[in-house]
Image (cartoon, grey):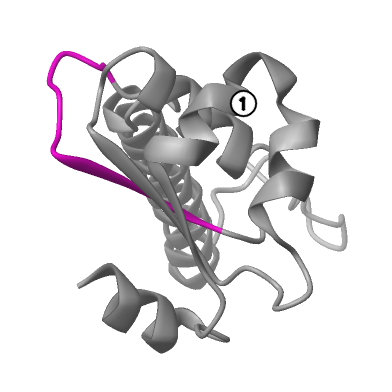
Amino acid sequence: MHEPGAKQDTTSAQPRPFMRTILALRHVTLLAGGVLLLAFALGFIWFLARVPSPDAALDRNAEGIVALTGGAARISDAIELLAAGRGHRLLITGVNPATHTGELARLAPQYQRLFGCCIDLDHSAVNTIGNAIETR
């Protein structure tokens, strides 16, 4: 029993219904956030597992190989594919008009013989659409 005039200890009293609702909402929000974070992480791991490797398997040959200028190793990679017998001819498209076969042959002396028979340079393409037209 309480003595008259004595203060009641409110610290041990039950939280009011409003406070219980706020605490419950906080717990639900934290739980939902954790579930969303876990789902995002698992989805990202799934995505990474499905990304193809940067090197494509070279298990087929083609009639022709096309190299678009602009990349550091595109031309040398294409020449190596041609030398390995992966194609019969190589088209290098988007070549600067001042660049000629002899200059490219000097950059790859071990494949100089291919420049006489099997490598064609396109000087007319200046963008992606031009590359596509010349490749066609």
111 horizontally vs 18: left or right:
right
- Residue at (79% x, 74% y) in the render: 98
Residue placed most toward the observer, 42 or 18? 42
| Residue position for label 1 | 112
54 horizontally vs 51: left or right:
right
- Residue at (37% x, 39% y) in the render: 118
20 horizontally vs 51: left or right:
right
Residue placed most toward the observer, 72 or 121? 121
Give coordinates of residue 133: x percent, y percent. Answer: 29, 83
Please identify the quadrant where the C terminus is shown. bottom left
Q: Is residue 72 above or below residue 45?
A: below
Residue placed most toward the observer, 42 or 38? 42
Q: Which residues are magenta?
A: 57-68
Q: Is residue 123 above or below residue 14?
A: below
116 horizontally vs 86: left or right:
right
Instruction: Identify the image quadrant of residue 72.
Output: top right
**Residue 106: in sight, yes or no?**
yes
Give coordinates of residue 116: x percent, y percent. Answer: 49, 38
Queried whether the magenta region covers residue 94, the answer comes back as no
Give coordinates of residue 115: x percent, y percent. Answer: 53, 38
Residue placed most toward the observer, 96 or 105? 105
**What kind of residue is marked 1?**
Gln
**Residue 72: in sight, yes or no?**
no
Instruction: Identify the image quadrant of residue 42.
Output: top left
- Residue at (50% x, 83% y) in the render: 125
Q: Is residue 70 above or below residue 44?
A: below
Give coordinates of residue 61: x percent, y percent. Answer: 15, 24
